[in-house]
Amino acid sequence: WVLAEIYTSPDGPSILQRFMIDGGERSILKTVEIVKRHPEAFLTFNRKTGENCFNTAFTSGNTSLIAFAMTLLVNGSLEVKSCCRSTLMTGIPAHAIALLQDMVSYMPPQFIVDIICKLNFVKVPFSHPRVVPTLYLQECASPSFFDPWKPCAHLLESQNHLGKEVSRHRIDLKHEHLLNPAVLPLPGLGSYQFLKALTVECPPSVFDNDAMELVLRIMWKQHIKSFFLIDFFFFVIFFCLWILFAELSTSSSLQNQTLMHSIGGTLLVLNLLFTLKELVQSNMCREPDYFRSMWNLSDVLALVCVYTYIGMTFFSSSSTAEEILLWVAVFGTFFLTLKFLSYLRGFPFTGWLISVLRQNFHDVQGFAVVMLVILVGFTVAFRLVLEGNCNSGTQQNCSPSFTQPVVAFFATLQLSLLSVYDPIIFQGNDNKLLLLLIFFLAVTIVTVVSLNALISILGDSYSRVQEHATANQRMERAQLIVEYLSLLPKRKREDIEQRTRYFHALLKSDSHGDLLVNHEDPGMHALRALRRDIGELSERSNERTKQLVDQMRNSVDGDISSLRSEVLQALQMLSMDVKRLQRTREAAYNPAAGAIALGNRGVMTAVSAVTNYGMKGGIFAPRNETDGKAT
């Protein structure tokens, strides 16, 4: 009746929409149950307003309904079951990607991760499997969800013109494959705004799926990689010129001065180009998320240091300026090194290592604070014990390493970590026993305990990074894609987004007709098919068990209801008897009506007298066993 009403109701929303509008827990469970059995029911709509079930779920404000509708759309459930209708030919996907982009900002990150991780390929409408060469392009992006390889299909079909059945048996497995055109169900997955929202608000696990890997791989290879390599080439030149300029700035020869001026001018021009790049990337410093990245901060500080060093080298020659120049050169080299490391994220063989180093530095922050407190404590202890030697008249047993607080801190660091110390501190000290105790504690706590704890922390950090190495590397790749998309002119960026609106792939299918994203061995395919069959059997068994339990519950409910009615009827009859006995008792104990009032003792006497009389008079005599009659 429900399904018949869904498809034949001439007015108002369908049953599925009525359940969603109600929003109660029972209504949501009914919605899930109907769609689970008949997914095509989600394609119904309101016959009066034309609103479909997706819009009803999206506008309901119910998080569970929104997640349910979004999951149905991204995992391809509707496309598999409804062969005659496709959501790709409606405005639902465009509405869904806009809503998903807004949800990234105000929904919990794990909520978005759960939806994106279920993103799966669906078969392209009006397409059929085809035989393609092994070296043929098997992934691409296009403005439409229709088959982008269709122009080449005539050439491929002409090579296999012997008939469909014959051609299937004549596939050269070494050079040809039978593949299915597939597409991701959401448009704009590679757009600048969507990728930026994912990289800023979501953890790296949001990219830990095959669909997002395809999106990032196509965007990187076809549109971003060339810009990255050009940028990296200019920075390598810039970094080498910086090292050469820093070396030449310490020389005073006339020839070096001439070369230094030419190198400095080239550095200034390249630094200006990198400054324009950062200004465009930060939207003239108006982008609030720009400074949340450690790499962007290091870029800005490196630019400032280069400008400062070049300017003070050419226009200042005082001794104070030389000391400042030394500090600027050191910090400029440090920040440029960080910028160099940020470029290494774009290479597969170094990107994972950058992720490990970032996680290690993040995890040892608390350990560094604890170690700093411990070292400061031991520094004060050593200075207190060794102060007597330095304050005495003879300075022969005084170690200069502990005379000043800053020098004493580094001396304690060397003593506790590297076991490097001046033996003179143990000679002629009045508190030698106390000094040995402090030395023993410093070496034990810092070298043995703390360093082992540091090794454990770094090992645990490495394990966690390796566990999510793929997701972390894809996150770094996505950040680079967002960075270079922000540098492109708006018209160029919109052109790329239009050309990459839908992402396609040629995929194999298993015995059930499901698309296979990963190219695994047949044993894994068989194992997956077996797991799917077991899951289907388990689902059927659970459904049958649920039906039996419901029947038993209904039967028990009916028995309980009948028993309840019988008990209520018996209680009512008992209540009437009690009331009647109560009225009889009141009438028997009423002296005004001529009744004899008997107490409990009088009642017992009367009963005994009547019983004795009956026995004597033969009223209660036993039956005669001969004739069976009473005597």
Image (spheres, rainbow, N blue to C red):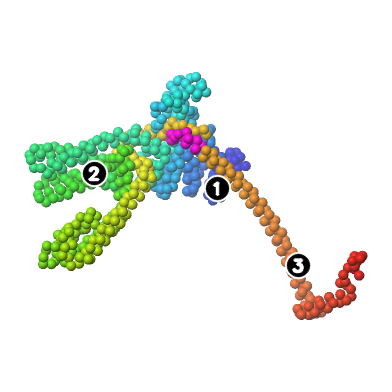
Q: Residues within 10 Å of mark 2 (few under 14, many from 20)?
A: some
Residue shown at the point (16%, 60%) measured from the top left: 424
Q: Which residue is mark 1?
A: 29
Q: Residue furthest left?
A: 254
Label 3 with label 1: CB-CB less than 8 Å? no
How many angstroms separate mark 3 from mark 2 (CA)? 101 Å
**The disc labelled 3 sits on which kind of residue?**
Asp
Residue at the spot of label 3: 577
Q: Residues within 10 Å of mark 3 (few under 14, many from 20)?
A: few
Please give the residue where the numbered disc 2 appears in the rendered image.
Answer: 337
Query: From which residue to which does the magenta span run?
Result: 514-529
Asked which quadrant contains residue 478, the reply is: top left
| Residue 166 shown left or right of residue 133 in the figure | right
Q: Position of residue 311 (x, y in %)?
A: 15, 44
User: Where residue 492 sits in the image (x, y, percent)?
Assistant: 32, 34
Circle nearer the N terminus (3, 1): 1
Q: Quadrant of the N terminus?
A: top right
